[in-house]
Amino acid sequence: MYRKSTAREYFESICVAVILALFVRTFVVQAFKIPTGSMENNLLIGDHLLVNKFVFAPARTALERMLLPIDPIHRGDIIVFKYPEDPERDFIKRVIGLPGDTIELRNKKVYIDGKPLDEPYVQYLFTPSDDEGPFDYDVRMTYGPVTVPATQYFMMGDNRDNSQDSRYWGFLPREYIKGKALFVYFSFSEESGLNPLTGIRWSRILHQIH
């Protein structure tokens, strides 16, 4: 009986492992690191997340919709997406407006179709000066009303005064969405330097994102 050599078995195993890793990376989960404070205090700079790319995958047929564990996008979901003005960059924000919603800000409070939105996660931790980049004072205080088009979404950061979001660059097309944030698998505070004993935020490991 023909028996494959040990070297060939190793090679085939490595190829299979690489293919599986690429499949998982492309279609199932993706790692993402929080680079800014726009989602504080829910997500901190230095948090490393796993993102479920499968849950929002487009189902093309009725059979796919029945068999695959695909969810619709809900208000309040925290998602990773391609930044519309530079699709090579990934952003992470919270879904605030769904297709058909009318969005308005009055004195920093969000209204959906004329009704105030309950947002216990909102923070105002940092106020940039009015002349810095896109952080325009008027837009932070008052915005809209605007109606979200079909197949698009209105995104906002939890740290409202320090978030570059739909108030500045508009609606997010459905096809730019990459996945839903699941949990923090690692977190490191860069303020502590390179000392892992003091830099690792142990309490945030496996922190569920919601």
Image (cartoon, rainbow, N blue to C red):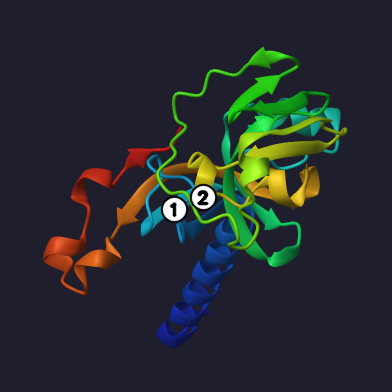
Residue at left offset 74%, top offset 52%:
169
SS type, badge 2: helix
Residue 192 location in percent, x, y? 20, 66
Q: How crowded is mark 1: few (under 14 residues within 10 Å), some or many (20 or more)?
A: some
Residue at left offset 31%, top offset 55%:
186
Q: In which quarter of the image is residue 69?
A: top right
Q: Quadrant of residue 7?
A: bottom left
Q: Answer yes or no: is residue 203 visible.
A: yes
Q: In this view, does 130 lie above or below 199?
A: above
Residue 32 location in percent, x, y? 49, 58
Q: Answer yes or no: is residue 54 visible.
A: no
Q: Is residue 56 above or below residue 145?
A: below
Residue 49 location in percent, x, y? 43, 52
- Residue beneath label 2, please? 162
Q: Residues within 10 Å of mark 2 (few under 14, many from 20)?
A: many
Give the residue type that dot 2 points to: Asn
- Residue beneath label 1, please? 37
